[in-house]
Amino acid sequence: MSFTYVSDAYVFANTPNSNSVTIALANYSANDLSVSADQVAEVSDYINDDSRRPITADVRVLGVTAVNVGVTARLDPMNESVKESVVSSIKQYLRGIGPGKTVDLAQMSVDVQSNSTASRFSITSATKDGDSSLEFAVDTSDADPENWIAEIAKVDDANIVLENWGA
């Protein structure tokens, strides 16, 4: 079975309790990166069907919660081609950061330097919804599925500020 609206699925064993599995679904084609409640229900029904469901597991399925990430960085050279490659590299790195993970700015710098055409690159600041904490939460401990959360990074071009290295 294929769910075309699911670009990524994050699986958490023993979350929130032992013998439970939490699956967070993302749709990178959607502006807010989320799947609809109907789509979550369809995947949940499929997984929890008696012919497929793990016998002892409590399986929880939810859509991700996108949080805005902003990055300010210096680079050299400062031209459109390099800026495009840097923006693409930042987005690719952040896409790999799932719920329950923390952004490692040093590693992001190394990845961007390695995967872009910038000869020099340095992050000067980064924020998650305006906060300097770059930890992405996952919490399904509440009995009400409406309160479950699995955060992932959403970064728009407007939230990436690139400055000239020499400025």
Image (tube, rainbow, N blue to C red):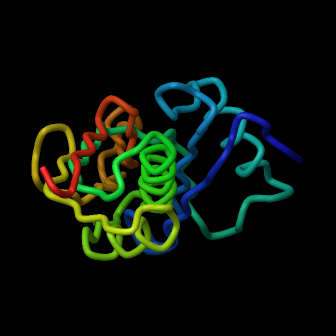
Q: Residue at x 51, y 34 (%)?
A: 33
Q: Is residue 76 above or below residue 72?
A: below
Q: Position of residue 85 (x, y in %)?
A: 51, 51
In this picture, residue 140 sits left or right of residue 115: left
Counting from the top left corner in percent of width and height, residue 101 is at: 34, 66
Q: Up-down: is 95 above or below 163? A: below
Residue 6 image offset from top left, x and y in percent: 68, 42
In the image, taking residue 110 as reference, residue 116 lies left or right, namely right
| Residue visible at 37% across and 63% down in the picture | 16
* Residue at the spot 27% in from the left edge and 44% down from the top edge: 162
Q: How many marks?
A: 0
User: Looking at the image, which is closer to me, 49 or 80?
Assistant: 80
Q: Position of residue 60 (x, y in %)?
A: 53, 51
Query: Which is more toward the observer, 77 or 123?
Result: 77
- Is 9 left, or right, of 78 in this rendering? right
Residue located at (25% from left, 48% from top): 71
Q: Nearer the viewer, residue 22 or 134?
A: 134
